[in-house]
Image: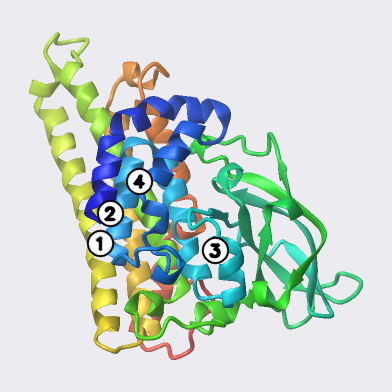
Amino acid sequence: MTDVMKNIAASADTLRAEAEASDALGKLTDTTAGLIKESGIMRMLQPKEWGGFESHPSDFLEAAMEMGHHQPSAGWVSGVVGLHPWELGQFDPRLCEELWAEDPDTWVASPYAPFGRAIPVDGGYQLSGRWTYSSGTDHCQWVVIGGMVADEAGNPLQPPQVRHFVIPRGDYEIVEDSWNTLGLRGTGSKDLILKDVFVPDYRTVSSPDMNELKYAYRQEGKPLYKINFPVMFSAGIGAATQGVAQGALMVYREYLERRVDAFSGSAAKKEPSFLLLYGEAASDIAASRSHLLTSMSEVYDYLAKGGELTWSQRLTFRRDQVRASRRAVDAIDRLYKSAGAASIHRSLPNERYWRDSQTALVHICNVAENIYQLWALDDLGDEEPQFAFV
């Protein structure tokens, strides 16, 4: 952990300098991707037998926040792509061999939504479809994607059978110019297309099995790999969001130091109204950071003592994770609404961080209302778990 954080800190200036270029390209620059790889963050959750570090999950979240603090798109790709070694390290060892035997720094992208249709064939599935939101995909050599098992005509079976499929780069097409968004433009979260690609059985897992820790290969005795997938994945999205908020606070502070009120002619940093808003936002963002890291540490400690997460514990984690994301972005929103006309110019990074924070908040893992409701139902005695990413 110490080396990863030191590596990120050492590259901070370059990460910030490359942010605008990443946005303009619609993907991470090669320089940014190289700094991410050199930092070691992508191997923090990877099993040791495949070249990883098996770091504490809170250490990984903290590193993703730090990366996003300096360049939001870099933090987002780190928080998403950096989770995949944790997941795929629990697949059939034959897949792990293909992924990491020659290069433990192999990156894997992930549009998980079940947009594909997978027809069972001898030894596996024939998969076709188009997927959106494949973050960091230009710098990845594989992808894990979602699909529904279908009949020979391509009609999804009933009840639905959702699976995840792991595909090498040569078997799918990246759709250029398919990522044109308000924010997080540097993530390059482009569309992918597959046409009749064979996926062997050992490179696939059902979504319910993945969510309930029923992988082909269990990393026995390691609490890191006892965390349910929705908890871990939403934590990564939450950390990336926190990183954006921390960076937004940083650039607002820089702006506040030199801003002069147009009417009074006084320095904004001496105006009580600005100081109040800045202090409140800084506290809310710090609280949100602490909330997410502490929640993950509590989960890890419980699992390390031999426990297994209950539905109620998973809901509580998700409640706190979405609240932390919402609180942090809301704090930035309040700051920027008071920041004055000069802050909207593209010559400053302020508007870019604001756009990135708003974009991060719409990810499904940050949507709060349904999670609040499900937690409240469970807390009030509803004994039937509802369908949700929990």
Confirm or deny contact between disc 4 and disc 2 (CB under 8 A). Answer: no
Render colour scheme: rainbow
On the image, numbered disc 2 is attached to which residue? 62
Residue for point 43% across, 71% down: 49
**Marks 3/4: CA distance?**
20 Å
Query: Which of labels 1 and 2 is toward the front?
Result: 2
Q: What type is the residue that disc 4 sits on?
A: Ser
Residue sitting at the far right: 153
**Marks 4/2: CA distance?**
13 Å
**Marks 1/4: CA distance?**
20 Å
On the image, numbered disc 1 is attached to which residue? 293
Residue for point 38% across, 77% down: 314
Confirm or deny contact between disc 3 and disc 4 (CB under 8 A). Answer: no
**Marks 1/2: CA distance?**
7 Å
Q: What type is the residue that disc 2 sits on?
A: Glu
- Local packing at callout 1 (Cα closer than 10 Å; few below 14, some 14-19, many 20+) is many
Number of callouts: 4
Q: Image quarter for residue 300? A: bottom left
- Vertically, is 337 above or below 73? above
Q: Is residue 58 visible?
A: yes
On the image, numbered disc 3 is attached to which residue? 101
Confirm or deny contact between disc 1 and disc 4 (CB under 8 A). Answer: no
Point out the tag, 1 or 4, that comes first from the N-terminus: 4
Residue for point 30% across, 82% down: 303
- Nearest to the observer: residue 367 or residue 292: 292
Q: Position of residue 67 (x, y in %)?
A: 34, 43
- Local packing at callout 2 (Cα closer than 10 Å; few below 14, some 14-19, many 20+) is many
Residue 39's tag is 4
Residue for point 60% across, 50% down: 134
